[in-house]
Image (cartoon, helix red, strand yellow):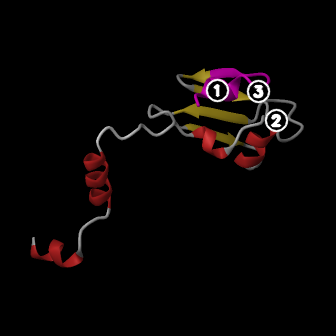
Amino acid sequence: MTAEVLLSRLEKVKATGSDRWIARCPAHGDKSPSLTVRELPDGRVLVHCFTGCATDDVLAAVGLEFSDLFPEPLPEANPDQAARHRQRRQGFAALDVLQA
């Protein structure tokens, strides 16, 4: 999902910078904008209500889920590449680090 999907469901949306917006929070009776939205370069969307509404409540009010804030993972082109990536993320054994 892009920020546009979320922004299209909000009221009083105003750009505050590059890939940053403020809008009325749909989770409470917001008279003035208190919800900030930001889209990061990697596609993640950040949401924050300054009156304290939980992100889940904000998203539920507009028919979205928390997982909608993250881009779809890219399909693995090569199964061997996926295995190497998982192995790399496991870290190093302490003994191996000390010996190095």
Query: Residue 99 location, x and y as percent?
Result: 10, 76
- The residue carrying pointer 1 sits among few (fewer than 14), some (14 to 19) or many (20 or more) residues within 10 Å by Cα, namely many
Q: Marks 3 and 2: in contact by CB < 8 Å?
A: yes
Picture quarter containing residue 6? top right
Q: Quadrant of the C terminus?
A: bottom left
Image position of 78 (left or right of 58): left
User: Which residue is the site of mark 2?
Assistant: 26
Vertical arrangement, residue 100 with respect to residue 67, above or below = below
Label 1 to label 3: alpha-carbon separation: 11 Å
Q: Is 2 covered by the magenta stretch?
A: yes
Q: Nearer the viewer, residue 12 or 16?
A: 12
Which residue shows up at 77% across the image and 36% down it?
A: 63
Give the residues drawn in magenta, as a range. Answer: 1-15
Task: Identify the secondary structure beneath mark 1.
Answer: strand
Give the label, 2 or 1, closer to the camera. Answer: 2
User: Which residue is the site of mark 1?
Assistant: 21
Picture quarter containing residue 34? top right
Q: Amino acid at mark 2?
A: Pro
Which residue shows up at 55% across the image and 25% down it?
A: 19
User: Which residue is the site of mark 3?
Assistant: 10
Label 2 to label 3: alpha-carbon separation: 7 Å
